[in-house]
Image (cartoon, grey):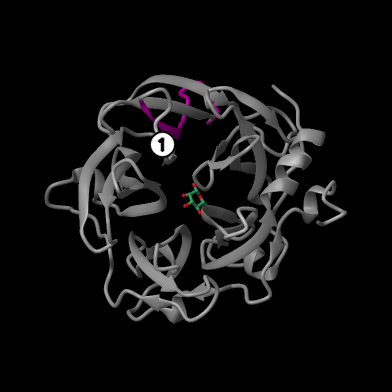
Amino acid sequence: MNTDAHQAGTLLTRRPENPILTGRDWPYPVNSVFNPAAVRLTSGETLLLCRVEERSGLSHLCAARSDDGVRDWRIDPEPTLVPDTQNRPEEIWGLEDPRVVWLSELGKFGVTYTCYAEQGPGVSLALTEDFKSFERIGQILPPENKDAALLPRKIDGRWALIHRPVSPMGGAHIWIAYSTDLRHWGDHQLILAARRGGWWDANKIGLSPPLIETPKGWLMIYHSVRGTVAGAIYRIGLALLDLDNPSQCLLRSDQWVFGPEAPYEMIGDVGNVVFPCGFTVEGDGDTLNLYYGAADTSISLATGSLCEMTAWLGKHGHSD
Ligand code: BMA
């Protein structure tokens, strides 16, 4: 147990191997790889579904697999999921920032991702069993919306989806929606609002990886976009949602717990960005592996303890 866990800055530890994946590792020419979804497969392998930015500026998704989740990545020789520009006009500018959740009731993974086109970014959903073939459900939320992930199980008989619409009144906040068929979404409710003024999470926040189920509640790792005269800073904070009613936020942190500090996070195509989209949990049920994009350029890994994070939130968090 880390005795300094009351210090927000010690809850997540960077792996010395960082960055664990860069565009130079790719089997075909790319500009950059970042913001990966992550899952642990039944084989024990870790699969990252990475956002790959091509040298056109547009992105697709590509799977990378590793036995230990850190080294020796086996990367699909060709893009894994590409825009269907013939049939899906909402994807003509690419696919970005996936989140993957295992839906045990369906025996399939739910892949939510940003579909990007002239009308702005929206949210699309696909289902897959093997990350080779995908059943595309299509665009489930129109622009402007992104940072969406399914919950892994139904809540009171309905699927739940965290998402981040942008308000025409200004501000971008975290919402939840419900559905019985994964296609039609309603009962939208605000669960976590961006603060205002000088706060680290003022004006614009969004879900980072999918929610993590813990005995204390759904742990939400969220990002904030702090505007400064020198550009935006993307940082990470914590909140806890009620297990039976995830529309209810129980606790949120006043301080960020992770922000750009390492050179590979501060320097790149978009400097000062840490952007996690995926996690795995070790067999001990406690050790969190958080996979994140660094400076929109490469992929890194930080580890932490779920118990320490929820204990820290219990001590330092508060309800809104
Ligand atoms: C956000 C998303 C992320 C990106 C970040 C920083 O709006 O588009 O994909 O990592 O900006 O550029």
Q: Is residue 161 magenta?
A: yes
Task: Identify the residue under disc 1.
Answer: 153
- From the viewer's side, name the closer residue of 62 and 230: 62
Q: Residue at left 50%, top 74%?
A: 21
Quadrant holding the C terminus = top right
Residue 233: x and y in percent read 65, 50
Magenta residues (range)? 158-172
Residue 239: x and y in percent read 65, 35
Q: Is residue 8 magenta?
A: no
Tell me the element at label 1.
loop
In this picture, is 290 found above or below 198?
Answer: below
Q: Judge left or right: residue 77 versus residue 22.
A: left
User: What amino acid is found at the position of numbered circle 1 in the picture?
Assistant: Arg
Q: Judge left or right: residue 19 versus residue 201.
A: left
- From the viewer's side, name the closer residue of 118 and 112: 112
Q: Residue furthest right?
A: 3
Quadrant holding the N terminus = bottom right
- From the viewer's side, name the closer residue of 27 and 215: 215
Q: Residue furthest left?
A: 86
Q: Residue at left 47%, top 75%?
A: 67
Label 1 environment density (alpha carbons within 10 Å; few <14, some 14–19, many ≥20): some
Q: Residue at left 32%, top 32%?
A: 141
Q: Judge left or right: residue 281 versus residue 5.
A: left
Q: Judge left or right: residue 234 versus residue 316.
A: left
Q: Residue furthest front?
A: 284
In this picture, is 170 found above or below 111?
Answer: above
Q: Residue at left 29%, top 61%?
A: 131
Residue 170: x and y in percent read 53, 26
- From the viewer's side, name the closer residue of 184 and 42: 42
